[in-house]
Amino acid sequence: MAHVSVPMYWRTIPQRYRLVGMQCKKCGKVNFPPKGVCKYCNASSEFAEVRLSGKGKVHTFTLIGAGGAPPEFAEQEKAGGVYPVTIVELEEGPKVIGQMADVNPKDVTIGMPVRAELRRIYEEEGVVRYGFKFVPLEGGA
Ligand SMILES: [Zn+2]
């Protein structure tokens, strides 16, 4: 099982708590998570920070069942049942993988409007870890 030390975890908090992408100054595309070199034009390492809305739509999804779940999903796995993991295309362009919450797995559809919410993901060594989950966007896009 992958293990992230606590100090390592705290260093990654800005990205986990704020959806901040890096907009390439050359091609204008938004890189998320931030990269050293733009993954779209591969030619620029100059970026401007952009706050992402967290809104987007389901690009694709998969239903995760028992077995083989990464540690951040182990709690749900222990609770049993199937839950959806989606790749969401954000309004700003980046595609982000995340678990979906507050939805019946069989109601998830491609193109469904969603938004990111900070949620408790799991607890390890007494530290509650937070991350983003996607929830259905009320009222549509
Ligand atoms: Zn670029």
Image (tube, rainbow, N blue to C red):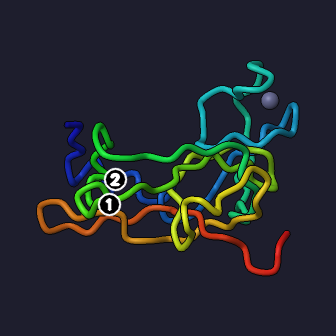
Label 2 and label 1: CA atoms lie apart by 6 Å
Q: Which residue is mark 1?
A: 76
Seen from this angle, which residue lies furthest front? 106
Q: Amino acid at mark 1?
A: Gln
Left or right: where does residue 114 sit relative to residue 99? right
Left or right: where does residue 77 sit relative to residue 33? left
Seen from this angle, which residue lies furthest top? 43
Nearer to me, 113 or 106: 106
Seen from this angle, which residue lies furthest left? 125
Picture quarter with the C terminus:
bottom right
Question: In the image, what residue occupies the spot 73% across and 56% down?
Answer: 50
Label 2 within 8 A of ligand 1 by Cβ = no
Q: Position of residue 73 (x, y in %)?
A: 34, 53
Dot 2: within a 10 Å radius of its alpha carbon, few (fewer than 14), some, or many (20 or more) residues? some
Q: Which residue is mark 2?
A: 73
Picture quarter with the N terminus:
top left
Q: Quadrant of ligand 1?
A: top right
Q: Position of residue 53 (x, y in %)?
A: 73, 65
Dot 1: within a 10 Å radius of its alpha carbon, few (fewer than 14), some, or many (20 or more) residues? some
Question: In the image, what residue occupies the spot 21% across and 54% down?
Answer: 6
Q: Position of residue 65 (x, y in %)?
A: 38, 47
Which of the labelled discs sits on residue 141, or is there none?
A: none
Disc 1 on helix, strand or loop?
Answer: helix
Asked if 80 appears above or below 140 in the picture, the reply is above
